[in-house]
Image: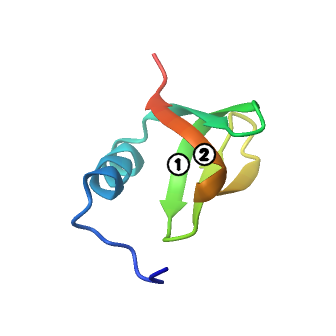
Amino acid sequence: MTSELEMGLPSVRQIQTLIKEGTEVELKLSTGDLLAGKVRWQDSICICLVDQYDQITIVWRQAIVYLKPRM
């Protein structure tokens, strides 16, 4: 696994757009848990999500089933 973020990947670019725009997202985990908040940052291993109470949750990418903008 590479340790650098591959900015050429569409998924990485899409998440960067969500970060820049401050879009709230819904993130479903392989455990069935559903998280909501704004993505603060991403790296090649994890995504940092901040919820409405400013609580930070760091999620391993391999645990994510889907991530989508919240409507």
When asked about the image quadrant of residue 48, the answer is bottom right
Residue 39 at x, y = what percent?
Answer: 52, 48
- Residue denoted by label 2: 64
Of 54 and 48, nearer the camera is 48
Q: Residue furthest bottom?
A: 3
CB contact under 8 Å: marks 2 and 1: no
Of 48 and 20, nearer the camera is 48
Name the secondary structure under disc 2.
Answer: strand
Sort mark 1 into few (<14), some (14-19) or many (20+) by Cα contacts within 10 Å: many
Left or right of residue 22: residue 8: left
Residue drawn at (50%, 37%) of the image: 67
When asked about the image quadrant of residue 53, the answer is top right
Left or right of residue 34: residue 37: left
Residue drawn at (78%, 38%) of the image: 31
Residue drawn at (48%, 83%) of the image: 3
Sort mark 2 into few (<14), some (14-19) or many (20+) by Cα contacts within 10 Å: some
Measure the C-alpha gap from mark 2 to mark 1: 13 Å
Q: What amino acid is labelled 1 in the image?
A: Val
Q: Residue furthest top?
A: 71
Residue drawn at (44%, 82%) of the image: 2
Q: How many marks?
A: 2
The label shown at residue 39 is: 1
Left or right of residue 54: residue 28: left
Mark 1 or mark 2, which is nearer the start of the sequence? Answer: 1
Left or right of residue 41: residue 52: right
Q: What amino acid is labelled 2 in the image?
A: Ile
Name the secondary structure under disc 1.
Answer: strand
State which mark lies toward you, 2 or 1: 2
Is 40 rendered above or below residue 4?
Answer: above
Of 36 and 31, nearer the camera is 31
Quadrant containing the C terminus is: top left
